[in-house]
Each structure stands twice: as C-alpha cells, then as structure tokens.
Image: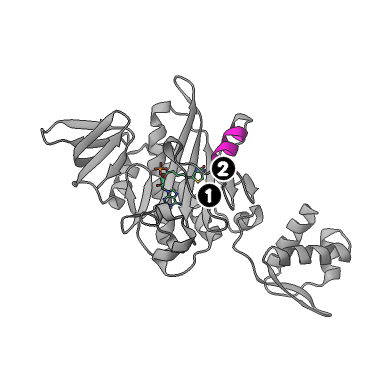
Amino acid sequence: STSVKKQLIAALFEANNEFLSGQALAEMIGCSRTAIWKQIEELRKSGFEIEAIRKKGYRIIHKPDQLSENEILMGLETSVLGRNILYFDTIDSTQNKANEVARMDAPEGTIVIAEEQTSGRGRMAREWHSSKHKGIWMSLILRPQLPPEKAPQFTLITAIAIARAIEEVTGKEPEIKWPNDILFHGKKMTGILTELHSEADKINFIIIGIGLNVNQEMPDFPEEVREIATSLAIENGKKVSRVILLQHILKNFEKYYQLYLEKGFGTLKVIWESYVTSIGKSIIARTISGEIVGKALGITEEGVLKIQDAEGQIHYVYSADIEI
Ligand code: BT5
C-alpha cells in the first residue's frame, strides 16, 4: 500500500489541478476504488488537503510541508545528492543511522532525514535540539576519493551550499562563522557536523550532519539556547517550505561538490570568504589544547583558520569554538 500511496500522490500531482476520478485512479494504479479511497483518507490524515467532488473525482489543494521521500524527490534538480532517501518520523540521530548505512555500502549522495531527533548531537557530544517538523535534521553520505586531511573542507563547502540556498529561497544573506555555524545577526541558525571514516591515506566516507532551524518561533527553542539561537522563519518574518529549502541546498551542494572535485578548494574559498564576517577581527579560539587570542587572518587553501596573536605569531587552527 506504500506503493499505491506513492503512485496516487504522483498521479494527483501530475494531474495539475484537474480532477481525477476514483475509477481513473484505480485503473492507472491497478487497484480497487476502495483502496484509492482509503489512501486518500491516509493522505488527508498526514496533512494533504484533497478536494473530492461527486462525478468529478479528486484533486490536491494543499500539500503538507513534510519531508517525505516523495516530497523531496518531486522537483529535485540533482543527479546524485538526495537521490537515495531514508526518511524517519522520529530517530535518535540521523548521524548514527547514516553511519550505519554507510558501513553497509549506502551509495554516495544518500541522505538520512528525520522530522525529529531525540538525541541530535553537535561537536564533542554536545546536544543539538531538533524539534518536530520545525527544521531540517539531515545527514548526507559522501564518498570522495581523497586523503582524510581534506575532510574539514567539507564543512566549509556545506556552509556555502546552505548560505546560497537560503539566499535563493528568502533573499536574505546569512553569515558564516568558521568552522561550522551559519548565523543571522550573530545568532546561530545552522550547525554542521562533519564526521569522517577513513583509512590512513584515503577517505572511506564522510557524513555531513546539517541541523538547520527553519520554522521555529522563540518558544520552540529550549531555554538554554534562546539567547543564542534563531530560525529562518524568525529572520524572514514568515514560514519557509522545508522541502523547497532542502531541494535548493542539495542542488547547490552538488554544484559546489563538483566544482571542488574538479578544481580544488581555491574557487570555493573565495565564495566562502564573501560570507564571513569575522576575518580581520579580534577573536578567541577555544581549542582542546587551550585558548588562542588574536586577529583572524582568514583561512588557508586547506580551510584551516589562521590567527595572529599579539606577539605577531601565526597559529593554525583546525577545530575550535570561536568567540568574536
Ligand atoms: C553543531 O555543533 O553546531 C553541529 C550540529 C549538527 C546537528 C545535525 S542535525 C542532523 C545531524 N544529526 C545529529 O545528531 N547531528 C547533526 P556545535 O558547534 O558543537 O554546537 C552545539 C551547540 O549549539 C550546543 O551546545 C548548543 O549551545 C547550541 N545548540 C543546540 N541546539 C541548537 C539549535 N537547534 N539551534 C541553535 N543552537 C543550538
């Protein structure tokens, strides 16, 4: 019956506002009219508004902002990224699931996406709040044939793809904060978590976790992040379709990923720098081995942050929390 449902959604969409009768649908899909009617009821329960008129049939008036496989695939402009989708209503963490399926040979471009995460995580086992239906909580599997030290660049490529997608969808330009945050007015709207599985000299797979606050209002955030977090809807003044945003992210990601594989990080570095606001400013970088205070000079060709301290010494920072 999942397949009846898929075919039904596809048929109703393709009908383009024309009515389709129960009989016609049953014949197209190869099932009974009762089965059609049952599935229509199911779709209504999951948020579709479907008009039904006697002697004419059915048509879709409104589709829900749901991140189901069908919704994502309809209108997706990529050839690899997002072509294999594992969708969950609720999950512990999409990173865990992505790791699991990547070990079992899930193809490049596979995405694991959930409406809600119960133990979403940030870097260093920090918590990532992922409230139901409000954001994009997703992990993307990539299998680039590259040495492991290139992995951190993927966080930066991801940030550019997201920033561009946000601009395309809302017309608003976010800021990127090295290495893994996207901000609006200094508040965090997106966090990126890049996890690497590699051998000594080559990457097996990379899992890129994206946590993007889309339609939360302030009360949807737990107390402890209200001061530091924001959502796209809050910044945009109105709700944003998660499906459309996701499609734009995947499209841009594929484009930049191609560019990266063909030409290296150089071109992307320039784009990345155009979104960064902290270059040239005084920052504090908190790393596992201690604090570095100084001026952010920019990133290297490899995506490593360069900081110059008061004595003029230059530090290369691979991973840190940055305070501006
Ligand atoms: C990150 O870590 O920013 C990476 C977040 C990655 C989340 C995605 S969701 C899909 C995938 N599955 C997962 O389980 N994870 C990935 P970090 O830089 O360590 O920042 C974590 C900090 O951000 C927390 O300690 C909080 O202070 C703050 N925070 C938590 N939830 C937030 C939210 N929804 N919006 C803004 N800030 C948040």
Q: Which residues are magenta?
A: 92-102
How many marks are shown on the rendered structure? 2
Please give left or right for residue 50 compared with residue 81 in the image.
right
Looking at numbered disc 1 in the image, what kind of residue is underneath it? Trp
Q: Pointer 2 and pointer 1: residues touching (CB < 8 Å)?
A: yes
| Predominant secondary structure, magenta span | helix
Which residue does the numbered mark 2 point to in the structure image? 94
Work out whether 145 lies above or below 18. Answer: above
Q: Tell me, yes or no, whether the highlighted magenta stretch contains residue 242.
A: no
Q: Is ligand 1 less than 8 Å from the beta carbon at label 2?
A: yes
Q: Nearer the viewer, residue 224 or 151?
A: 224
Q: Tell me, yes or no, whether the highlighted magenta stretch contains residue 99.
A: yes
Please give left or right for residue 106 compared with residue 54 in the image.
left
x 51%, y 55%: residue:
135
Which residue does the numbered mark 1 point to in the structure image? 137
Where is residue 54 drawn, in percent x and y? 82, 80
Answer with mark 2 or mark 1, whichever residue precedes in sequence.
Answer: 2
Where is residue 241 drawn, in percent x and y? 53, 63
Q: CA distance from mark 2 to mark 1?
A: 7 Å
